């Protein structure tokens, strides 16, 4: 297993070196682009693992294979850690984990049986992880809760004032989330659940909000036009625009690192999903990865950390 991980890291660093050499003679914008900017769940036979990829889907590497079904990855602000979920008990129990970006030091942070913990996201300082918890209550009703914990898994606490899921931190410390279904709406709230501001308010389900890199826009899902499609709106809820127009269901929007494109998963004929990208105006939709879902943006990848780790293993 150690040799397998070491080989993967060498391939990653070699790819970074090659891409750095080939872009060195181009413009500054291209030279500073990040070779691995997407992290996602990739299905291999009956298993799903965490992979890193470039925006074009040409270069990819496995970074985590903790359980038979890993997904919803998110990279810490430093680029040194990832958070993700893994499934246990015949996929009845979902738990949040963390690991180093190279897949080492995997830690299971939540461990509540028959509960679905998913969609982790990091605070801007990397000290806190927010995540969704779903389960069937004693009365048979489906519960959708938003929880916080320290990055090491300690101090797990529910935001009692909120019901919903798919939460993430905003730059100002507030949280963006989708309210509990029937129908779900996109909202912003303080971290204690107070001062809720609705950005959508209609009879459809609006879900999975993701903030653009500059904080000015939100990509999200909605079925307001009869099918679950990808939309974009301003941070105040104005100027809501539909990006996709398909007969299949779309999932999991995420932004490119420069904010010009939106990634999303679309159902395929094999019972899973493929990863696509589109310009944020909905033009130039293109498939980039097969059997991939739950993509997240990698804004910082700590290459020097990986290099030090490889050198340490060679000694």
Image (spheres, helix red, strand yellow):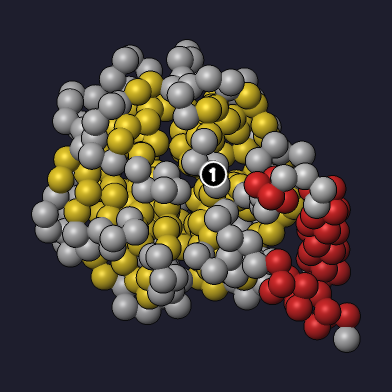
- Viewer-side residue, 217 vs 111: 217
Q: Judging from the image, what secondary structure is the residue with disc 1 in? A: loop
In the rendered image, the quadrant that contains the C terminus is: bottom right
Q: In this view, does 135 lie above or below 180?
A: below
Please indicate, yes or no, whether residue 119 appears anywhere in the rendered image.
yes
In the rendered image, the quadrant that contains the N terminus is: bottom right
Residue hosting label 1: 258
- Viewer-side residue, 71 vs 55: 55
Q: Residue at x 24, y 25 (%)?
A: 204
Q: How many numbered marks does the figure carry? A: 1
Q: Which residue is drawn at 55% across and 55% down?
A: 299
Q: Which residue is drawn at 53% across and 28% down?
A: 279
- Report the side of 179 relative to 118 (left or right): left
Q: Name the spot of residue 296 as percent of width and height, x first.
A: 52, 48
Identify the residue at the far bottom of this view: 315
Q: Name the spot of residue 146 as percent of width and height, x first.
A: 27, 57
- Viewer-side residue, 55 vs 115: 55
- Residue 185 picture quarter: top left
Please indicate, yes or no, whether residue 71 appears anywhere in the rendered image.
no
Characterize the local packing of mark 1: few (<14), some (14-19) or many (20 or more) Cα atoms within 10 angstroms: few
Q: Residue at x 42, y 58 (%)?
A: 121
- Report the side of 176 relative to 62 (left or right): left
Q: Name the spot of residue 48 as percent of width and height, x first.
A: 63, 47
Q: Name the spot of residue 47 as percent of width and height, x first.
A: 66, 47
Identify the residue at the far right of this view: 314
């Amino acid at each position: 297993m150690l040799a397998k991980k070491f080989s993967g890291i060498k391939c990653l660093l070699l790819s970074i070196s090659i891409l750095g050499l080939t872009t060195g003679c181009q413009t500054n914008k291209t030279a500073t682009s990040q070779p691995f900017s997407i992290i996602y769940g990739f299905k291999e036979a009956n298993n799903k693992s965490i992979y890193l990829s470039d925006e074009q889907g040409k270069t990819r590497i496995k970074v985590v294979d903790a359980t038979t079904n890993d997904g919803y990855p998110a990279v810490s602000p430093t680029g040194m850690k990832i958070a993700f979920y893994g499934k246990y008990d015949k996929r009845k129990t979902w738990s949040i984990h963390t690991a180093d970006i190279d897949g080492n030091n995997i830690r299971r942070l939540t461990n509540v049986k028959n509960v679905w913990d998913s969609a982790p996201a990091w605070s801007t300082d990397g000290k806190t992880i927010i995540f969704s918890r779903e389960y069937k209550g004693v009365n048979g009703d489906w519960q959708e809760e938003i929880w916080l914990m320290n990055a090491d898994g300690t101090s797990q606490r529910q935001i009692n004032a909120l019901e919903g899921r798919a939460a993430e931190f905003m730059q100002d410390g507030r949280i963006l989330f989708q309210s509990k279904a029937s129908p779900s709406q996109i909202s912003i709230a303080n971290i204690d659940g107070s001062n809720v501001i609705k950005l959508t308010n209609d009879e459809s389900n609006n879900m999975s909000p993701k903030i653009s890199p500059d904080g000015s826009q939100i990509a999200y899902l909605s079925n307001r036009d009869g099918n679950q499609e990808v939309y974009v709106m301003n941070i105040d809820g104005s100027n809501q625009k539909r990006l996709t127009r398909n007969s299949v269901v779309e999932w999991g929007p995420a932004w490119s690192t420069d904010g010009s494109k939106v990634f999303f998963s679309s159902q395929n004929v094999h019972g899973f999903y493929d990863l696509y990208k589109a310009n944020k105006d909905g033009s130039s939709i293109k498939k980039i990865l097969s059997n991939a879902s739950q993509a997240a943006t990698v804004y910082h990848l700590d290459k020097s950390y990986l290099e030090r780790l490889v050198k340490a293993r060679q000694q």
